[in-house]
Image: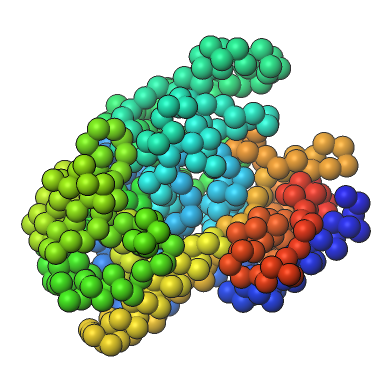
Amino acid sequence: MDEQRVRAALDAVVGQLRTFVPDMAPYFEDDRPLGEYAKALSPTSAVAPEHAARQELIARSVRRVLGRAFGPGGPADTVTAQDIRAVNIVDHHQLLNHPLLLGTNIIANAGRLLSGRPAAPIVTLSCSNVNPSNHYMRNGFRFRGTDIPYFSAKEHRDVMYYLPPRPFDFVERLRSLKRWSAFAPDDQDFLEEYQQLLNGLDHSGCTVHRDQLATVVHGTWPRLFSEELRPHIPDLLYAGAEDVARESLIELLAEESWLSTALLDPAQRQRVLDTFRGVVVAWDEAAGKGTHFFWLRHPRRPGLLRLYVQGNALVPADERFAHLRIPLEREALREALHREDLVPSVALYMTLLLFAGIRPLVGPGSLVYTTQLRDGWRTLLDRHGPAEEARLLDEVDVTGMIAGTPVFFERTGPTLTTCYAADVMSAGGVDATYVDSVLRTPLNDLLSVGSGGVYDLFANSYIPKEKRLAERTGFDEAATLVHDWV
């Protein structure tokens, strides 16, 4: 596609997104430099006392979750409630890898990357209810356009949350698959060094793979940047969102709140089930999608069972496991959470963040469902009480867009190629000039690079069939046009 055709295709895609997906329009019209936009993502207004207390609870839970991975005296010890007032909820709990997820931590924290001042850690609440085979991981990571596995194909249905510790053995797997010789000698050297780095990190306190991933993300994040920048880059801490919610709910369910009432009071619980039926991260019983509030640990493998409310219990939808029902009673839920038999759903942990007044930093899809959750709770609480909690929800901003576009590229002649994390690390990371150029890029230009992917996400639901565009630009073509400074 020549430059004129790429420009026309980008303009057409962005134009339809602005017209048919009005929630996305403000971002494609925002021409502030990324650095300026990112600074505005952090709340500066006073925190309601109710929210302040709940944010302290969430911060305690984050410290406990990360403390298991890093041990006492580790980077998690410094996390405060201030550090989670606005938090990235887009990423998956896995190795740094995919360009779209990789970009979220850059966009969310762009204003802090070259500040020159001591910086508090970056906390990301990453989703660990994902399979190793998910699109953003594909059983490992990607390097030089090739998928590099450290999971086997037979593990495709397992979930990251329940996987036991494991070695990072992708070099051996590549050799056994007879794919090792396809890599150039320099790339083989990188893969061997990378594997040694991952296995050489301190995993001594890690009893599950998700703890290993927290140490790995922390240990590899600086390598996205050049050596001279690394001492000044804030720590990146990935705390599994489900784990943080589980720890928080053990405390919350010991006391009275509208959130505990929503789970424990039959009448209010039914209103909740009726209100959020059909929301993508909640439940749709007729379609066999989602779960009522929690997932249940599968008794035979590292997986999850869907739960539905029946009477006063959560009962597995799979009748073979109906005997594993969990009573919807305060202590029964707390004990099941403590045993890690129950895993909070996305709808429940996002509700917990809203309950605490935490600003979720979102992607195009999560912008939609987070708005639906907030507005649904606000209506429910306004009608059935407590009304004060509905007012508190009015204060929660869910419009912090940080996803939908890559930010790492390399030039090959006249064109750019989108980079995965391992590609960036193997090249020694990006320097201050690169980071500064990203920070000066207008937000709408930055997002236009990923607009084709955003269009695909919304096309079937929002754009009339007769108006849908047949031609879209890929990341590389769009980036070559927009990021001519690379």
Q: Is residue 110 visible?
A: no
Between 43 and 398, the one nearer to me in the picture: 398
Left or right: 99 as drawn, with respect to 206: right
Quadrant housing residue 294: bottom left
Between 321 and 46, the one nearer to me in the picture: 321
Total label count?
A: 0
Locate residue 318, reporting x and y percent: 26, 47
* Image vertical order of residue 285 relative to residue 380, above or below: above
Between 474 and 459, the one nearer to me in the picture: 459
Residue drawn at 49 percent across, 62 percent down = 366
Residue drawn at 30 percent across, 87 percent down = 382
Left or right: 141 as drawn, with respect to 249: right
Q: How is the image coloured?
A: rainbow
Q: Is residue 182 visible?
A: yes
Quadrant housing residue 371: bottom left
Residue drawn at 67 percent across, 71 percent down = 464
* Image vertical order of residue 23 relative to residue 383, above or below: above
Locate residue 94, reporting x and y percent: 45, 39
* Image vertical order of residue 446 relative to residue 173, above or below: below
Quadrant housing residue 409: top right
Left or right: 206 as drawn, with respect to 132: left
Locate residue 403, reporting x and y percent: 57, 57
Between 30 and 166, the one nearer to me in the picture: 166
Locate residue 306, reporting x and y percent: 29, 51
